[in-house]
Amino acid sequence: MTSFGLDLLHRPDLPALIARWQREVTPAELRAGYEAVLAAADTVACGRWLLDLRRREDLTEPVVNTWFSSVFAPALRGRYPEAVRLAFLISPLRAQQTVTAIVSATDTDCEIATFTDEATAHAWLSRSVG
């Protein structure tokens, strides 16, 4: 499925929902993209997401970060049998930059990690919780 500059693929063998942004997107498109990820995850009851941000230029859009941390992420609490696990895949260049997005795991029931290597991200997503 492609929309909002986003490709979505459910991989039950991993298990993970993979979301790859393919182009620059506006804040409204980014919010719509996250809502599309959530709808796809709900359809397959998958709380493990690989969010590939390597093709996006701006990773720290303040309006989106505020919405993500105060509205979107808290809505994930209790949504699936296990806490949602979000693996953000970024480029090595982006990994050297300061990231201002802050999401509290205690407020969201999320586990969040950032990776520059996709295999490592998948390994983290697939490990058992607890």
Image (tube, rainbow, N blue to C red):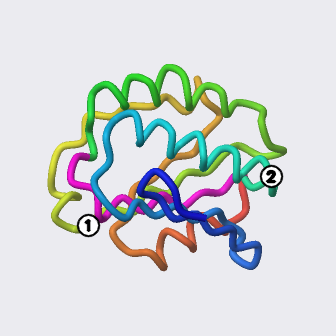
- The answer to whether residue 72 is above or below residue 82 is above
- Viewer-side residue, 26 vs 48: 26
Magenta segment, which residues?
47-58
Which amino acid lies under the numbered mark 2 shown in the image of this protein? Thr
Say which quadrant the N terminus sits in.
bottom right
Residue 3: x and y, percent?
51, 55
Would you say 63 lies left or right of 68 here?
A: left
Q: Are marks 1 and 2 in contact (CB under 8 Å)?
A: no
Q: CA distance from mark 1 to mark 2?
A: 29 Å
Q: Residue at point 59% right, 57% down?
A: 49
Give neighbour class at mark 2: few <14, some 14-19, many 20+ (Cα, 10 Å).
few
Q: Residue at point 50% right, 57% down?
A: 87
Residue 70: x and y, percent?
49, 20
- The answer to whether residue 117 is above or below residue 115 is below
Residue 55 located within the stretch drawn in magenta? yes
Residue at which label 1 appears? 91
- Viewer-side residue, 21 vs 89: 21
Which amino acid lies under the numbered mark 1 shown in the image of this protein? Ser
Q: In which quadrant of the rendered view does residue 63 lie?
A: top left
Q: How many marks?
A: 2
Residue 27: x and y, percent?
34, 35
- Where residue 43 is drawn, which disc sits there? 2
Residue 9 located within the stretch drawn in magenta? no
Q: In which quadrant of the rendered view does residue 90 lie?
A: bottom left
Q: Residue at point 73% right, 62% down?
A: 128
Give neighbour class at mark 1: few <14, some 14-19, many 20+ (Cα, 10 Å).
some
